[in-house]
Image (spheres, rainbow, N blue to C red):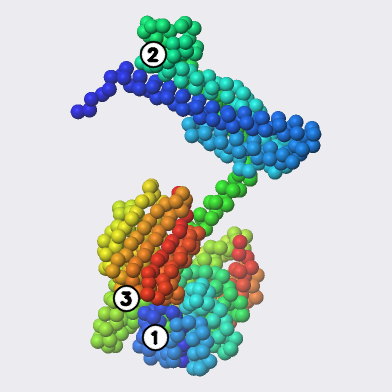
Amino acid sequence: MAVARPAWRRTVLAHARTVLDALEHLVGGLGTALLAFIALLWLVLAGLLCAVGVGLLLRSTLPRVVRVVAERERARLSRWGPEIIGMGPAPARVSEAFADRVVRRELGWLLVHGTLGLFLGAVGATLIVQAVQDVTYPLWWRMLPPDQASPSLVFWTVRDNGDALAVSFFGVLLAAVFVVLGPVTARLQAWPGRRLLAPPPDVDLSLRLAQLTANRAAALDAHATELRRIERSLHDGTQNRLVAVTVLLGATRRALARDPDVAAALLGQAHDAAEEALTELRTVVRGILPPVLADRGLPGALAGLAANCGVPCRTDIDVPGRCAVSVEATAYFVTAEALTNISRHSRARNAAVTLRRHGDLLSLRIEDDGVGGADVGKGSGLAGIRGRIEAHDGTLTVTSPPGGPTVLQMELPCGS
Amino acid sequence: MRIVIAEDDPLLREGIALLLRAESLDVVATTDSPDAFLAAVDAHEPDVAIVDVRMPPTHTDEGIKAAVEARRRRPGLAVLVLSAYVEQAFATELLAGGPDRLGYLLKERVGRVEEFLDALHRVAGGGTAIDPDVVAQLFTRSRPDSGLDRLTARERDVLALMAEGLGNTAIAERLVVTEGAVHKHIRSIFAKLDLAPTDRADRRVAAVLRYMENTRG
């Protein structure tokens, strides 16, 4: 039986979380506010230098500086509220930037956040630091030199434990103030960003849209290549088998009346062709998505391949999360083909499979200590898989000097 | 009748050869690529070629190109093209030089041995054989204002069989009507579609296909 938490405890926990979130947001906001402040100083400096001519050289950096700071705030705000989409690169020329409404709104935000936001962040951070310092004051005030024993924000001189305890109560008071005002302050600090950094309702987002469309088109292209591969294996493999079955059956029917022996032989061939069609179909389906990937994920599937390899095979797999299904399938097929080759041809004593993820890149390395001289040219099973890798914008390199060792390295964008 | 087969799938290639030889037809060569097929056409001087559309190296339309080239090298060669699926572009490309001695069938039609042999003999005899599915697709793709909607249901049946390459007698047999009735339907169809009335099978197919080609939506 589950024990329900008392209602008051849940309320307290929820409040504590709100206060901690507020603290995190205020400190994060303090960070971008500092950046905004520095950017403001940079703008003023460049403006002053323009008056004497030197600043003209700095002019071209201004839109980019504003945009970089604004993008940081967009990303920060997107993490804990409604998403604010990024605006991509800033206009290159100052004149274009001033004509751009997005940039003008960013300038307005810079002004507010670099001053008021900075102030709010500083007040919030000071408040909490002071509260912690004052609450714990009775524990360590005796270590201070007697003439400096009064903390800031406290107006009485601390001479004995009673005074120190009063400081502690004052600290609790400060903490209470933060509990009440912290969340409001954090929202207030974020407000200019939420208002001014969001795209104006009627702004032209076509450029941004074009970028997203291009990424999507590339993904769809890889997908289309994959579909074409499946269509081809169905039409050229499975369908041909089945047509052969119908041809042989048709011939059987014609032969039945004339020569039952011939008919029997034809029927046997038709049977074989039907079984071949089934095998072919199974191969095509497995080629689309090996069932083991869905059951055990890529690490489990690769470990299974390594365990079944004819050569002792070490695995070192460290991939957090999952990649796109077709990417995982490709990594699986490369490993399966490579391990088959190692078992058959390499005469290796040891093999190793290493799988890592670096950012958006899935990196697979398969090596053995065999005789080398592997050929990825025509006719090898890897040649077909290379096409699959390239369809995903990946690369496959094989180094296999005579005498070994053979190293197969694949890099594949994860697509997730 | 000397026959050359071009089909890259070994099982299907041997299956078709076996079927034809069982019918006492003379299969003089079986080939698995466009180049080998053209060489066989040069070497064996066949009367009929049976060609798969998808062949190496790219498995797209090599068979169509090879068929066109084979007819250029050996005018009078009858060609029966086998396709994995209905693709009107293939049919159009193939029929561009006129529909005499040409056939375009779906692969699965080969299993209907009587129909397949019928189409083979028709093509070898100078006629045309278009797969009913291809014809049906031509019909569904034609524009609503093409005049096809003015035809009666029975006239549409007759037109479809004409487009497949059947003669009046065969159409009458299929529809279980008299030849005179078929003749009447055809005159009515030509009148409604503004086609020149003629009875020669190849001309009729050419006229019908061209008409549909021009009015495609």
> Is residue A126 at least partly visible in the picture?
yes
Q: Is residue A63 above or below residue A324?
A: above
How far from the left and from the top, in percent, is residue A202? 65, 35
How far from the left and from the top, in percent, is residue A397? 46, 66
| Chain under numbered label 1 | B
Q: Are marks 3 and 2 on the same chain?
A: yes
How far from the left and from the top, in percent, is residue A17? 40, 24
| Chain under numbered label 2 | A
- What amino acid does circle 1 point to? Ala
- Helix, strand or loop at label 3? It is helix
What mark, if any, has residue A142 been given in the picture? 2
Q: In this rendering, would A163 be left or right of B102?
A: left
Which sits in the foreground, A393 or B143? A393
The Cα atoms of the two marked residues, 1 and 3, are separated by: 15 Å
Q: Which residue is mark 3?
A: A273
Q: Which residue is mark 1?
A: B17
- What amino acid does circle 3 point to? Ala
